[in-house]
Image: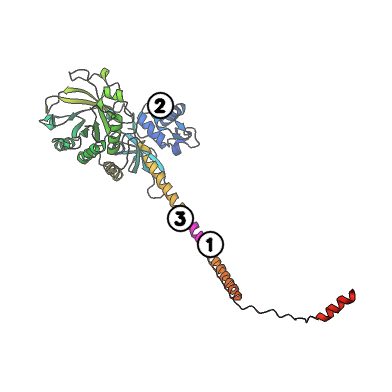
């Protein structure tokens, strides 16, 4: 793939979308999309503007993909971060500083980064992945595979030339396929994409999922095989897939149409035209599918008897070693720590950044609150001290008043005038 430079004079000064920035200054993502689509950035810019795929100078991924003839979808993160297809990666542009500078490169299957800023290959630390798939790339052509269990007798693994093999792992809450460990070992040794499936009995969904997780080990994809009648098939499958994390659903076309399983789930659908074993694209499933099991009567060198044959159109699985961040996330998925495929996976890194920033803000707010509460506490202590002094003064005054009430009452000394009875009688007589 030719590396296009965003600062090329032919388009560097063109306004990016409907914003004020230019392709030369902020058009790394646009330039990467241009490389994916096989056109120049100025043409891509015009196409996206007409398609309404810009929010000012920010690109709306799903609209951009549709306008440029690319496929865009959010596969499970454990797969997407180790994408075996050419895709776009967000990278740490300036790791020497604490300043966050968003930058994107085109990431190729061998790990090579094509940097539109320098026009050369680079080795930045990868933060997140945007999966845009160009169906015209050789690497993106359909993959062919088989699924096997103890019912299939493998006589020579070296003769099996397939892109992927999905092996039966468990069933119910106690059964482990006796050939599983050997099967996945042989698949991995030959560099084929390795999958594991659990055959549902329909008992306790959570316990069946935990049994599957306990035995599956590290594989490229995990699948719930749903082939039974149940009073609540969608609810049961939701509980199972929630417990597992990144998990596909296998069922036949009729059940998929009947039950209407969630669209965001990755689906492996069985639909056979006849028993000839031939692939007939006119008879592909009517429901949405990512892997199509088109016959149970296939013939493959190295296997005695018939075997199921499958074709995959959206199987993005890594054959590269996991980086540290991806390994931690994969381990978290294995422990069922809530990595749901329902989320738009490429937003995950940004969501985490926002979450951390919000937590930092909360911590600062808590510090301010604690500081304010301490000041309030100091004021309360002073108020209590003043009130205590006032109470002590009141107690002293009360005590003094009570002591004064206990003193003896002194008799009132007033002069007593002598009464002259005879004089009074004489005055009465004279008045008469």
Q: Earlier in the sequence, mark 2 or mark 1?
A: 2
| Residue 141: quadrant of the picture | top left
At mark 2, the secondary structure is helix
- Name which residue lies at 40% across and 44% down: 353
Seen at 45% across and 53% down, the residue is 366
Task: Look at the picture and state if 74 lies above or below 326.
Answer: above
Spot occupied by residue 87 in the image (x, y as percentages of width and height): 33, 34
- Kindly identify the residue that appears in the image at 18 percent across and 33 percent down: 168
The residue identified by callout 2 is 67
Name the foreground residue: 51 vs 25: 51
- The magenta region covers 369-381
Q: Are marks 3 and 2 in contact (CB under 8 Å)?
A: no
Q: Which mark is residue 417?
A: none
Above-or-below relation of 39 to 398? above
Depth check, front residue: 280 or 398: 398
**Taking 136 as reference, is 196 left or right?**
left
Circle 1 sits on which residue? 379
Q: Residue at x 31, y 43 (%)?
A: 337
Badge 3 marks a residue whose secondary structure is helix
Earlier sequence position, callout 1 versus callout 3: 3
């Amino acid at each position: 793939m030719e590396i296009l430079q965003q600062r090329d004079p032919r388009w560097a000064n063109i306004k990016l979308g409907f914003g004020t920035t230019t392709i030369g200054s902020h058009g790394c993502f646009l330039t990467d999309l241009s490389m994916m689509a096989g056109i120049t950035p100025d043409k891509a810019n015009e196409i996206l503007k007409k398609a309404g795929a810009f929010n000012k100078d920010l690109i709306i991924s799903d609209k951009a993909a549709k306008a440029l003839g690319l496929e865009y979808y959010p596969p499970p993160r454990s797969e997407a971060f180790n994408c075996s297809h050419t895709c776009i990666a967000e990278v740490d542009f300036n790791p020497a500083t604490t300043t966050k500078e968003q930058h994107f490169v085109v990431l190729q299957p061998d790990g090579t980064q094509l940097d539109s800023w320098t026009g050369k290959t680079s080795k930045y630390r990868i933060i997140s992945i945007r999966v845009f798939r160009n169906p015209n790339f050789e690497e993106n052509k359909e993959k062919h595979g088989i699924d096997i269990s103890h019912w299939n007798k493998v006589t020579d693994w070296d003769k099996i030339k397939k892109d992927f093999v999905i092996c039966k792992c468990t069933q119910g809450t106690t059964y482990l396929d006796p050939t599983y460990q050997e099967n996945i070992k042989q698949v991995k040794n030959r560099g084929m994409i390795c999958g594991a499936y659990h055959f549902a009995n329909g008992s306790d969904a959570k316990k069946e999922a935990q049994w599957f997780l306990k035995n599956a080990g590290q594989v490229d994809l995990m699948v719930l095989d749903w082939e039974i009648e149940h009073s609540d098939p969608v609810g049961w499958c939701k509980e199972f897939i929630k417990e597992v994390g990144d998990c596909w659903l296998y069922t036949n076309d009729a059940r998929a149409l009947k039950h209407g399983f969630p669209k965001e789930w990755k689906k492996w659908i069985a639909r056979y035209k006849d028993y000839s074993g031939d692939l007939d694209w006119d008879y592909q499933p009517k429901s949405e599918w990512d892997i199509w099991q088109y016959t149970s009567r296939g013939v493959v060198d190295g296997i005695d008897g018939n075997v199921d044959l499958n074709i995959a159109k959206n199987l993005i699985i890594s054959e590269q070693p996991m980086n540290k961040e991806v390994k931690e996330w994969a381990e978290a998925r294995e422990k069922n720590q809530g990595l749901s495929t329902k989320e738009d996976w490429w937003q995950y890194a940004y969501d985490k950044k926002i979450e951390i920033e919000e937590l930092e803000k909360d911590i600062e707010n808590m510090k301010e609150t604690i500081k304010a509460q301490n000041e309030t506490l100091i004021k309360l202590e002073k108020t209590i001290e003043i009130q205590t002094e006032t109470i002590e003064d009141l107690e002293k005054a009360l005590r003094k008043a009570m002591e004064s009430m206990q003193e003896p009452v002194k008799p009132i000394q007033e002069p007593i005038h002598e009464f002259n009875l005879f004089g009074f009688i004489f005055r009465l007589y004279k008045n008469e």
